[in-house]
Image (cartoon, rainbow, N blue to C red):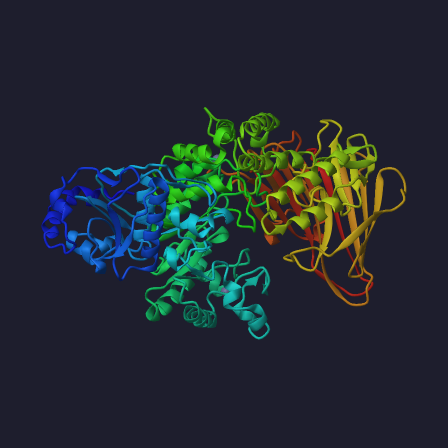
Amino acid sequence: MADLDYNDKSRRQFLKSAVLSGVGLAAGRIDALSAPANAPLTLVEKGKSTYTICLSEAASPSEKHAAEELQRFLEEMSGARLPIASDAEKPAGDLILLGKSVLVEQLDPRIPYSRLGAEGFVLKTSGKQLLIVGGAQRGTLYGVYTFLDKLGCRWFTPEVSVIPKKPTLTVAPLDEMQKPAFEYREPFFREASDRDWAARNRVNGASMALDESTGGKFVYYPFVHSAYLILPPEKYFKDHPEYYALVDGKRRSERAQLCLTNPNVLRLTIQTVLGWMEQHPEASIYSVSQNDCEGWCECENCLRVEQEEGGAHSGPFLRFVNAVAAEVGKKHPDKLIDTLAYWYTEPPPLHARPLPNVRIRLCPIGVCEAHPYENCKDDAYFMNHLRAWSKITNQLYIWHYVTNFSHYLLPFPDFDELAADIPMYRKNGVVGIFLEGDFAEGGGGENAELRSYVMARLLWNPSVDVNKTVNEFLAAYYGKAAPPMRSYFDLLERQVRLAPPGKGQSMWIYSSPGSSYLSEEFLAQSEKLFQEAEMAAADQATKARVAKARLSITYVKLMHSKAFEVRAESYAPADLGRLQENFRSFMSDVRSFAITQLHEGVPLTVDEENFSRLMKPYRVATIENAELRVHVAAELSGRVIRIISKKSGKDLLHHSDPGERLYPDVGGLSVAAYSDYLAARPYDVKWELEPPSGRGALHLRGSFSNGLKAKRVIRLAKQGPIVTTEITLENGGDSALDVVLQSRWVVGSKSLEGAVLSLRQPNGKNVEQKLIEPGQEPRGSQVYDGAAQPDGEWVLSGAGTDEALVNRFPKEQVSRCFAQWQGKTENAVTMGLWSAKRTLAPGETLKLEADYGVHTPK
Ligand SMILES: [Zn+2]
Ligand SMILES: [Zn+2]
């Protein structure tokens, strides 16, 4: 941003000093004296130039590169190739002075280098001289690109630039200083990683191919989630389980964290970080951060620190990170320590304050991305966290999300949000921003090119006109197809823009293809605009760009068409043959654009395997009574897939989005056996339906790969809208196995506003828990055990169904209950039961019974 302060105070003094110091200039002709101070410069006239680009003999690699870039683009624009000389050669004639040099010192000794830092610069005309002078690392280079930008040059993508043709190039008088709004600027898209694109758009992120010639970059080591890099469990866990988090009564080295109050953990961390600093001196920031999961330590000391810090899980973390930073800072005062405020550590601690060499990366992972955070009720919780952190540190970084990580191609209308929130971050004292998108090999995330470009402009100058920036990009990128592409852009933004004038729909980074902003009407209108754009596209390259953008709409339609239906004895998509054909053709298009991932971390081959394994008809068994009709697909993990209330005609079960990767083997009413409450995956099992043994009951047989065997009975109560389930597990192997059984159902449909879980605790106390609270993120989870456990029954009401839903169980069989809910795009509530955990000797059995249905008050 233009530094007005500098301009206002020093403009007159600068001109005066330039004139005075110019007297001593050694370079022959002193144009500062002979030309009027505010006349435009003519750099090139009809393809001829009198100018020389002049550098210090001691110019940095990026300043030398800056000179070549300036030479190259001025020639592209005007046809004139300006010579490059060093100040030691004492070039005569008109000069473009790049970077700090003897000549610049003589011409203007007042340039505030210390304020420019590594990336700031000054652009000035002085008589007939032009000065582009900035920090040696990247400042002068950025000055050159900013100057070329003023002449109309744009680098939209690595392939698409606009370099205007101007055989005569004049420059209006200049006197300004610029510095980036944020010290760290990283749009994290494959499309943004190109060296030249990144340098020309003045971003400096760790993922970019920036090298010495472009002034390097902001280097992290390691980048994030470093807990187990610091203390690898394979090295320490066996002898020192106490270094690792105590979770649910057990020290754990999988999907958990470290014990942050253990003094040896601190000692070893300091040792490790000092080692990193020796081995990776190129890095300026070292990450001491939580793993990408929950599992914080519940040992007595860690809990005590949490309590002292107002109950914040960030308390133990920040105290630990500060202790590391204090110690390593003694030896490396110029290095920074990074940590996260993420997920369970998002709310700040009560007392601990980040040391000056600590950078907190605050991650708004749970926010609605459709609306400016300050205007969206679902984001109020995050704004509270941001304001609280910005009160206790003036070195805050943000890890912002700019794609849908479950569906990289899903339309992601967050441009209103970005245009508002990057300035909002700046206002809240944020100094660095990482914008996480699709960085998979080959890229291809929705709108990645436009998005990267707009983000880079905003990160340099948050007050840039986003609307104009989008138009410039679209005009260059789509040519004659730009008007319909702009209409598509507006149509998409209007789906979410707050009403009026928009439709006010919400969007999250894991939103599903079934989200309401991706309505059939929107898809139909989009198709029309894409047809128009394809017709208008003037050449093959543009046609390909339109076709690539259109993949997003094709993807959404494809996901919608995966929806399964029950028809007679079959559960299948409406038109399986056509779906298979469309899928093949879609995947071939995806590959033709070199896209390698449609979901974070999942190669295309996995999508294809899942598709051919899961997209097929499943046999359905049905039982019914006067109130309910129940459909079971045994091959789908023994799942109950529908519980239809005959009274309302509605399904009690939530219908999972067909875009879920393991769809249709998800949701419903299901059982599973685990080794432990916190195990990542259940034991592998195959279910089969046994021959019918009378109306109103289904018998299933489960065979586990580890030797467990299960019998499951699903029946309808003789009277009333209740499904009764029972599973009996037997250890059919020859060694003992740790086993815990889980039974769950996923319910809810329209909205969770007003949804209430009601339960009576064993002490007789009635609890009514509202799931969605104003000002809070519309999701949550809770475990109910011990004195908080429901006394054999819990009821969910107001979750989009007219009827309240009930789950009953024999309390002696159940050791804890849990609920998970989200009122984002899916509006689903999972109610689950866990049996007691047992070590089953061969031949021993474990049983869990549970009833599910419509609650009929007594
Ligand atoms: Zn601990
Ligand atoms: Zn919102």
Residue 580 image point, x, y percent: 74, 38
- In the rendered image, the quadrant that contains the N terminus is top left
Asked if residue 406 is positioned above or below residue 628 in the image, the reply reads below
Left/right of residue 372 with respect to residue 75 in the rendered view:
right
Which one is in front, 847 or 733?
A: 733
Using residue 152 as the reference point, say whether residue 439 is left or right of it.
Answer: right
Identity of the residue drawn at 79% across and 39% down: 617
Q: Is residue 118 left or right of residue 409?
A: left
* Residue 430 can be seen in this image: no
> As rendered, which of 158 and 400 lies closer to the eye?
158
Q: Position of residue 587 (x, y in %)?
A: 66, 42
Which residue extends farthest bottom?
Answer: 239
Q: Position of residue 10 (x, y in %)?
A: 15, 45
Left or right: 805 in relation to 90: right
User: Which of the 4 image quadrants contains residue 705?
Assistant: bottom right
The quadrant the C terminus occupies is: top right
